[in-house]
Image: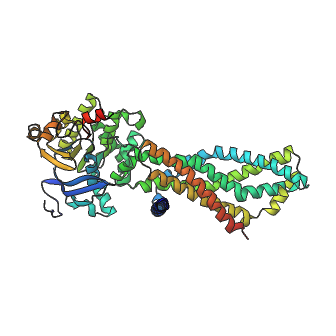
Amino acid sequence: MDLLTEKPDQEYLVQIRNLNCSIGKRVIHKGINLDIPRGKVTTIMGPSGCGKTTLLRLIGRQVRADSGQILVDGVNVSRLDLDGLYALRKRMGMMFQSGALFTHLTVFDNVAFPLHEHTRLSESMIRHIVLMKLQAVGLRGARDLFPGELSGGMARRVALARAIALDPMMIMYDEPFTGQDPITVGIIMQLIRLLNDTLGITSIIVSHDVQEVCTISDQLYMLSEGKVISHGTPDEMQHSSSDAVQQFMHAFPDGPVAFHYPAPDYYEDLIQA
Amino acid sequence: MKILDSFQRLGQNSERLFAHTGASSLFLLRILAGIPSLCGHMRLLLQQMYSVGVQTLTIISVSGLAVGMVLGLQMYNILVDISAENTLGHVVALSLVRELGPVLTGLLFAGRAGSALTAEIGLMKATDQLAGMEMMAVDPVKRVIVPRFVAGVISMPLLAAIFSAVGILGSYLVGVDLLGVDEGAFWSRMQAHVDLYGDVLNGVIKSLVFGILVAWIAVYEGYHAEATTEGVSQATTRTVVHSAFAILGMDFILTGLMFGD
């Protein structure tokens, strides 16, 4: 695809063109093209190790691409200096799989951290904002707990409250549902949708939980072996004609992603012994 | 072929050594450039001074006392043969202030505080806390690394001074109270022969240099640890081992420069 002009696009917040990325000797992405629409929930799916999380890290430029274009609100992230990058990151929130809460700070101080760092608000104003954000995720009563005292689901909700502390234009969720009980999954799904719709935030989810993402996403992208193999609405993807998409969406054990790791012929292998 | 192989290995190892030296030097520059950012965040520094410095006090004072007592005993046994036991205070004070204080404190500091720093920073990295901070547009070098580095550099000379002082007290207990060395001679000879600049100040400089080395190695290893359980444990081990080598090597050089003539 052709390169884009670097100015904010009306329809899309994040635009990626011809992205190539490798970490060490491992090639992660081979020419990815993606568009994330403003104000919508977009999910990036794919088998483990296909570079979904790396894609989020590329958008926040924690990792640098080998080549290609990543535009966030019209800004080419790979060409930003440190000040520009930090200015952009203040407008992004990210919820890490682990929560990434500061273990030496209470829930309250974790949510207050970005406010203390980036604003000159008074303590009473910061207290108001923190309590409002915690109320939004239902954990106002847990403000004095330390991250070690929280369950995995609660930690992710605190991380979400911290991610929205500075009222960002977009939030990136890294595997938000992995390893959570059904109630927590339900809560997180509801929160993602609610925050997206009420605050007008653009949401990017990286996940391989098909059921959950089909329920809350407006658009799905599927990655496999470093490429985008399909995209569309959840409904379109469910009825896709592609074998790879069908295998993933319906959890078939064998298909384009083979059940067997490459091995010599079974018969030959047994006889040799 | 064997010779070629070993040449190749030598080349690879030297290349790695140079890359490592370069990376850690650049990291040190980043830390030094971040020191002004401590203004307005003195609380972070004080917290680290507490965990790096104050919490190391026990092991430093206990070791200092033990070393001083043993030194007093051994030196007495040697000196008494030549009827020079009155110089015990002089001998013990010089050994402690010039050598044993800075070096042993450095080694203990690396074991107690350096390893803890590496493990803490490494685990913060493994649990995405550093990445999280970066995504919140906060530089982890300024908020996490700089306070720990500065706290280490400030704490080390203070701890070494305490080690030497407690050590002298220990040798006093053994020499004067137990073995009957004359108290007046013990202190007056020490006062007369230990020079403020030549001995005490050089000892302080040594401990400051060791503090910089240990703190630098500890935060570098932690920040660049592989973000896994084994990665953090290996980094912690490397901190202690490299610090020990760095202290002993640097001690030889500094001693040569300070007391060589």
Name the side, left or right, on which B108 lies relative to A71.
right
Q: Position of residue A89 (x, y in %)?
A: 29, 54
Q: Position of residue A155 (x, y in %)?
A: 35, 37
Q: How many marks can you see?
A: 0
What colouring does the structure picture have? rainbow
Name the side, left or right, on which A136 lies relative to A242.
right
Q: Residue at x 30, y 59 (%)?
A: A85
Identity of the residue furthest to the bottom in this view: B261
Q: Quadrant of residue B206?
A: bottom right
Image height of A241 relative to B192, above or below: above
Image height of B113 relative to A254, above or below: below
Nearer to us in this view, A105 or B140: B140
Nearer to us in this view, A118 or A190: A190
Nearer to us in this view, A56 or B40: A56
Quarter of the figure that contains the C terminus of chain B? bottom right
Residue A196 visible in the displayed image: yes
Identity of the residue furthest to the right in this view: B83
Name the side, left or right, on which A73 lies relative to B74.
left
Q: Residue at x 53, y 46 (%)?
A: B116
Q: Residue at x 58, y 46 (%)?
A: B112
Q: Position of residue B41 (x, y in %)?
A: 47, 54
Q: Residue at x 66, y 62 (%)?
A: B252
